[in-house]
Image (cartoon, rainbow, N blue to C red):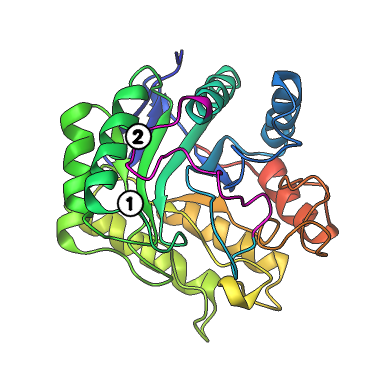
């Protein structure tokens, strides 16, 4: 059960009623990574390291059961919270619940992604509804999280969002509506409490220039918090990376997103290939010290943290 409560006030996120300067990190495989899940001491060690490097929120996925060509690190047939009927697996939920509690102890938060377009085919609508209903009920004791319905998809998102709100009216919900530059339609952006678009990655004008403008547009139009949820990352073009992207560009984007009033989540390529690939840390964990490239970005996040 969480001691801390995340809430929304206008365009700002609050933690226990005080402005919360969310600064996040992609750790999609957190529930399924063997090195991270050795025991609570090891999880806490990593959480403290993330926090010491300016990170106060993790983006974690429930579905990690992909097949080729998405041989992401730690993917496996049983790396999912759901049965084919959408029932929540008790053992997997126990791991998630434990992680949320440990994150809470650190005064951090979590953005939890229920479903992702990468799983093809995904669950049918009855199973999606069942999983949404069960997960929302089970998560009620945990108030330090944002519930994200889809990663880069909008299939039945209004229906699933309405189910989540019927089960827990106070739950903060969001959705990543689609790929880069897809900012969401009026219906879903109105329903969601927080907006989490995947902003521009490929503009000739520079993603670090264009993306903050997209965040500003959404803030002005919908008057609710906006997180730059999966900004342009270095690395593997096959999965949306921008080869040749430089650390200073990610840093510039973070600065500009903050300046317009949005929140920033550092995205990277440390999970997109199996173990042994040069971009993947030996642990499979997004380690701030894994490479000089990422170290530059984490130095900025640590030394110039976001302010409320």
Majority secondary structure in the magenta region:
loop
| Location of mark 1 (residue) | 175
Residue 64 as seen in the image, left or right of residue 71: left
x, y percent for residue 47: 68, 30
Residue nearest the observer in this picture, 6 or 87: 87
Q: Over which residues does the magenta segment extend? A: 72-91
Quadrant of the rendered structure where residue 270 is?
bottom right
Nearer-the-camera pick, 31 or 197 = 31
Q: As displayed, is residue 91 above or below residue 243?
A: above
Disc 2 is placed on an element classified as loop
x, y percentage for residue 117?
41, 61
For the residue carrying disc 2, how many other residues have a C-alpha within 10 Å: few (<14), some (14-19), or many (20+)? some
Point out the frontmost of discs 2 and 1: 2
Numbered circle sitting on residue 87: 2
Rendered residue at 27%/54% (across/down)? 124
Residue under the point 75% across and 56% down: 294
Residue 169 visible somewhere in the drawing: no
Q: Secondary structure at mark 1?
A: loop
Reply above or below: 215 against 80. below
What residue is rendered at 35% in x and 23% in y? 138
Q: Looking at this view, is 303 or 116 the one in front?
A: 116
Disc 2 and disc 1: Cα gap in Å? 21 Å
**Percent of width and height locating residue 127:** 28, 45
Total labels drawn: 2
Is residue 12 highlighted in magenta? no
Residue at image location 16% in from the left, 41% down from the top: 162
Taking the magenta stretch, the answer to whether it contains residue 80 is: yes
Q: Which mark is residue 263?
A: none
User: Does residue 60 sit above or below 116 in this rendering?
Assistant: above
Q: Residue 201, position in %: x, y?
A: 51, 74
């Amino acid at each position: 059960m969480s001691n801390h409560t995340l809430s929304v006030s206008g365009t700002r996120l609050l933690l226990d009623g005080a402005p919360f300067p969310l600064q996040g990190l992609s750790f999609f495989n957190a529930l399924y990574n063997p090195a991270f899940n050795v025991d609570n001491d090891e999880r806490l060690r990593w959480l403290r390291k993330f926090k010491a490097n300016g990170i106060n929120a993790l983006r974690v996925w429930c579905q990690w059961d992909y097949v080729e060509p998405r041989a992401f690190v730690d993917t496996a047939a049983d790396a999912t919270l759901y049965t084919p009927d959408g029932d929540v697996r008790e053992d997997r939920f126990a791991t998630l619940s434990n992680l949320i509690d440990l994150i809470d102890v650190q005064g951090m938060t979590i953005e939890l992604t229920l479903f992702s377009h990468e799983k093809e085919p995904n669950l049918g609508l009855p199973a999606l509804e069942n999983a949404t209903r069960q997960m929302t009920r089970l998560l009620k004791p945990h108030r330090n999280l944002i519930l994200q319905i889809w990663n880069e998809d909008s299939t039945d998102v209004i229906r699933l969002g309405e189910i989540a709100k019927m089960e827990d009216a106070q739950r903060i919900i969001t959705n990543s509506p689609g790929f880069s530059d897809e900012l969401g339609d009026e219906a879903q952006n109105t329903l969601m409490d927080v907006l989490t678009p995947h902003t521009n990655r490929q503009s000739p004008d520079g993603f670090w220039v264009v993306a903050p403008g997209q965040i500003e547009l959404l803030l002005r139009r919908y008057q609710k918090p906006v997180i730059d949820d999966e900004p342009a990352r270095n690395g593997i073009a096959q999965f949306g990376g921008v080869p040749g992207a430089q650390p200073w560009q990610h840093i510039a984007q973070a600065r500009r997103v903050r300046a317009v009033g949005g929140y920033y989540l550092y995205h990277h390529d440390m999970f997109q290939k199996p173990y042994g690939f040069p971009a993947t840390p030996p642990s499979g964990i997004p380690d701030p010290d894994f490479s000089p490239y990422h170290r530059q970005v984490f130095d900025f996040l640590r030394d110039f943290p976001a302010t409320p």
